Amino acid sequence: MADTVRTGPLRVALTGGIATGKSYCLARFAELGAPTIDADALARQAVAPGTSGFEAIRSRFGAAIMTPEGGLDRNALGRLVFANADARAALEAIIHPTVYAAIERWLASLAQVGQSRFAIADIPLLYETNRDGDFDAVVVTTCSAEQQIERLMSRSGLTREEAMRRIAAQLPMHEKARRATYVIDTSGTFEETDAQVKDVSTRLAGPRAIASRP
């Protein structure tokens, strides 16, 4: 899709490994004036009670991933899908079409307004879903492997083994970085990350925003 003639802002995907600072960088891009959208937030909306996504998940996975109140037990679902590749694929088949359709509608709405030089969609599983070709540029966040593990354990309460399992379920970081248009290394200070975000933002807003990608 990236080679189709389109109007509107440059379509930019922000991705990277889990716990590598994507959300932080997305917020910084927004502060700099870029329109942004978060695929994780869209995914939560796609499986909210009362939606077709919620009913599909309940039908596929059963009572084991439901709370006593009838809601979705995200922790139980996470443990299940990260321990079983088939279950993870089934969940993604339910969620991803809805998420990507929502992103397309958002980009189309921005094209009608015509005020932004670029727009950024935070999509954690961009490469894993083979959708990087939908975008004009890809920004990848990265950090050291140990930082990634520690951050994930700290924010989620997972054990080290569980954190490593979730990281291993994604494409290796070095491969994501290799395929990126721009890489932001979040292993340093917030100030250092902020400077990189500002630099990438300036490049994306410039006349030669798209570097060659493999």
Image (spheres, rainbow, N blue to C red):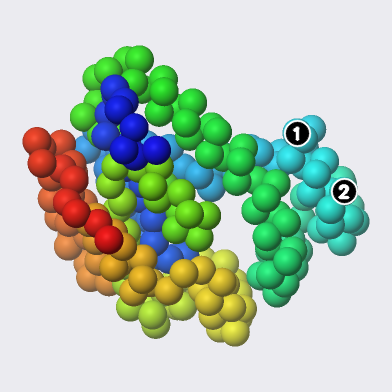
First in sequence: mark 2 vs mark 1: 1
Q: Closer to the observer: label 2 or label 1? A: 2
- Residue lying farthest to the top in this orientation: 112
In the picture of the structure, the residue carrying the numbered disc 2 is 59
Taking the image as shown, residue 42 lies to the left or right of residue 107, namely: right
The amino acid type of the residue labelled 1 equals Thr
User: In what element is the residue under mark 1?
Assistant: loop
Q: Is residue 54 something one can see in this rendering?
A: yes
**Mark number for residue 51?**
1
Structural crowding at the residue carrying mark 2, measured as other residues with C-alpha within 10 Å and reported as few (<14), some (14–19) or many (≥20): few
Separation of marks 2 and 1 at Cα, in angstroms = 13 Å
Q: Which residue is pictured at 45% across the width and 77% down the height?
A: 150
The amino acid type of the residue labelled 2 equals Ser
Structural crowding at the residue carrying mark 1, measured as other residues with C-alpha within 10 Å and reported as few (<14), some (14–19) or many (≥20): few
Quadrant in the picture for residue 56 = top right
Residue toward you, 131 or 62 = 131
User: Percent x, y for residue 172?
Assistant: 43, 74
User: Percent x, y for residue 104?
Assistant: 47, 31
Q: Which residue is pictured at 27% across the width and 18% down the height?
A: 114
